[in-house]
Amino acid sequence: MASVQRSGSFIEAARRAQIVDSAIETIAEFGYANASLARIARRAGISKGVISYHFAGKDELMRQVLTDGLDLAEAQMLPRILAGTTALERLRGHVEGNVAFVKAYPRHLAAIVEILANARDEAGKATVEASSFTGPVDRVADALPVGQEVGELREFDPLLMAQSLRGAIDGMVARFAANPDLDLDAYGRELVTPFELATRKPD
Amino acid sequence: MASVQRSGSFIEAARRAQIVDSAIETIAEFGYANASLARIARRAGISKGVISYHFAGKDELMRQVLTDGLDLAEAQMLPRILAGTTALERLRGHVEGNVAFVKAYPRHLAAIVEILANARDEAGKATVEASSFTGPVDRVADALPVGQEVGELREFDPLLMAQSLRGAIDGMVARFAANPDLDLDAYGRELVTPFELATRKPD
Amino acid sequence: MASVQRSGSFIEAARRAQIVDSAIETIAEFGYANASLARIARRAGISKGVISYHFAGKDELMRQVLTDGLDLAEAQMLPRILAGTTALERLRGHVEGNVAFVKAYPRHLAAIVEILANARDEAGKATVEASSFTGPVDRVADALPVGQEVGELREFDPLLMAQSLRGAIDGMVARFAANPDLDLDAYGRELVTPFELATRKPD
Amino acid sequence: MASVQRSGSFIEAARRAQIVDSAIETIAEFGYANASLARIARRAGISKGVISYHFAGKDELMRQVLTDGLDLAEAQMLPRILAGTTALERLRGHVEGNVAFVKAYPRHLAAIVEILANARDEAGKATVEASSFTGPVDRVADALPVGQEVGELREFDPLLMAQSLRGAIDGMVARFAANPDLDLDAYGRELVTPFELATRKPD
DNA sequence: AATGAATGAGTGTTCATTCAT
DNA sequence: CATGAATGAACACTCATTCAT
């Protein structure tokens, strides 16, 4: 009762979230190039100007979509990664986290992929750092050298291995996109085995 | 008479090739979204109308860029794959073929990636089948079951493994795009080892 | 009760003055076209809506800016004009008054000039009468016929002469705008001489 | 017959001229701020895109309007100025040239004034040099020092005098704008006298 | 075979204004 | 009194496409 709700902040946050949601849906469905502000606004049932009112520009909206999506991804992945005590357990956690994220937020994932692939400055290259995706998330890459030091894993280039795992997971995502009936849990379990074989130190 | 007709065909083919080349360069440099027909025409030193004259629309041009690029890719890869007699040799040939293609035609590869990521019908989805990329190329997937039958390889889901290899190779490409100084040959050699470990039947 | 009512009026007046000030600064700095209500509000540290609350529209605000500015101009000029007893003294007073105004309120002057030049009804012409600027101010024009009658000045078209003086003074202002280091007092003194020569009756 | 007309260049030039004309009319009638490309196109009876096709942007169109107008002004003024052999004759020629220009091209003049007053970079000041107007035209300023050297004119600051003449002429233009029935020739003749009195060396 | 010209829809963005709170 | 939110029209500009020549 005593707490006076600052309606301004609340409405602001709610609208921004609504717009971000609409942007995610639109991008996921029609692709980045076809996700105009007009379309995003129409889907949200608001006027174009509202977006401009709440976001400095399309760039900021896209950055927010990306940020929100990455936060959700990290929330799915990080606990599963950190739960593991050995490098292989963490690798497994990493895959499971990705599976969980794909299952929980497929549209967010699609939007993230679209933005990372397409958002570039009109003259040249990336408006947004792809590393902001892989960076905060791929803690698994850190786990590999540790596993090598303690003798759990054989010698290999950790970056290459992490990159390959990332690619293999992206392959899973691509397959899921093409076939939504795919059993992601099974795929994830099967995916771990090759990387176990490829990384663990033979007895 | 026949020769007159043919000269038409010849000019036609030359113009199309010139336009496709310019499109590849433009897409590789500025990205799909910034590759307007105007820009492509300007780079080719021709007028915009010429493109419309020789191609039914932007879609057809993009499809041609893709087709040409994939043909070049196949030309690099297929001999190297078929040269192998065992499944593992073919897997190695597949990776080497990809490396060769990236080194020989980096712009084509960039254009292919851009188009596959972005080209969609205005209403919904892909104008172009992603499978048209992996399909004709990933003969390696066919080699895996054979390797399993003859006891060279252990049991696993061949499709998953092929997809993971595809993803791992794409990871290499992404790294190369970010760092053109990357030693692709070394990366390719290193990349094979994990997949050998992951697929071969233990003695 | 009465005091409560008055407090309303006082706040009202203060707010209007604050907004007008911000408008003047904004127009002087960025020009009429770039002086959006948003910019004016931001500079005043208030929300856009406040302006709409206190002014019927942008037009009224601009009219107020103009009125305030012209009042200040008249306050600078009128005493100096009226201090003169002969036509030539009044002419000199007129120039000195202009100089004093430019020196004291350069931003107001800039804003006045901008508004007079730009403010027009969307369909056609001036929202604001240019004569409202020259009208109340150019009392000097009244002094010229008097000077002619008493034999102080030669015969000429008083309106043309007054207009030319106005133009010559505007020339001074333009020069000052381009070069703020200009010695306005000296310029003013020098400016009087030609008009003395041009108006006084030869002995 | 032999001369093959390059229809491209001709149409291009004609269209540009048509657009420039429409821009001049629109600016003169509605003011710079209300002279949107849409309005200019509508008046010209063409689509908005045509303007973009023939001009790199609104800036270029405005620069062209200015250039064309200044060329016309110079064509009216220069011969009349150069026809004079003494400084006072050139001064008279300058005024007459201005009168001729105002009479022949009042809309051009209005457009020039509007553009010079309003065209500024969004952040700060002039997109276009005001000196490009006065500069090439005000050759009269050059004549004054010569007149002083040969003893035709008394000593005064030539720049101040030229600026004052410029301002007095602008005053004439302003009066003409307010009252198109004004007898410009008479006004011009009357305007010369004060400046003769103000500049010539007394016997 | 090729061009320059033109179109009309669509882009992101800005703006003055309105209004419920 | 004041605000933040929202609107809808207008802005300059880009684009793929069409078409007469």
Image (spheres, coloured by chain):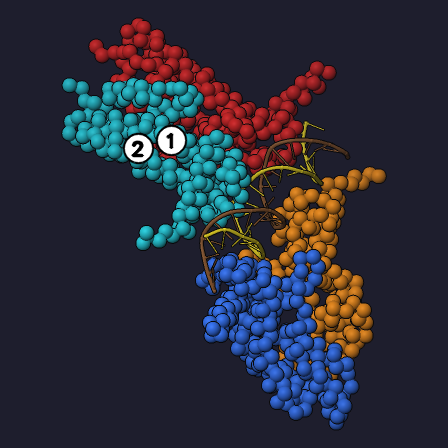
Chain colours: A orange, B blue, C red, D cyan, E brown, F yellow
Q: Secondary structure at mark 2?
A: helix
Left or right placement of residue C4 versus residue B48 in this view: right
- Residue for badge 2: D76
Q: Are marks 1 and 2 on the same chain?
A: yes
Q: Give percent across and percent down for residue C128.
A: 51, 23
Does residue C149 appear to the left or right of D45 in the view shown? left
Q: Residue at x 70, y 15 (%)?
A: C2
Q: Is residue A6 above or below residue D185?
A: below
Can residue D28 be seen at all in this image of the molecule? yes
Residue B97, image x and y in percent?
59, 82
Residue D105's label in the rendered image is 1
Residue D85 as seen in the image, left or right of residue C72: left
The residue nearer to you, when weighing B159 against A6, is B159
The amino acid marked with disc number 1 is Tyr
Report the residue that reaches farthest toward the front: B1
Q: For this rendering, which residue is in front, D176 or B99?
A: D176
Position above or below: D176 against D14: above
Q: Please state which amino acid type lies under the numbered disc 2.
A: Gln
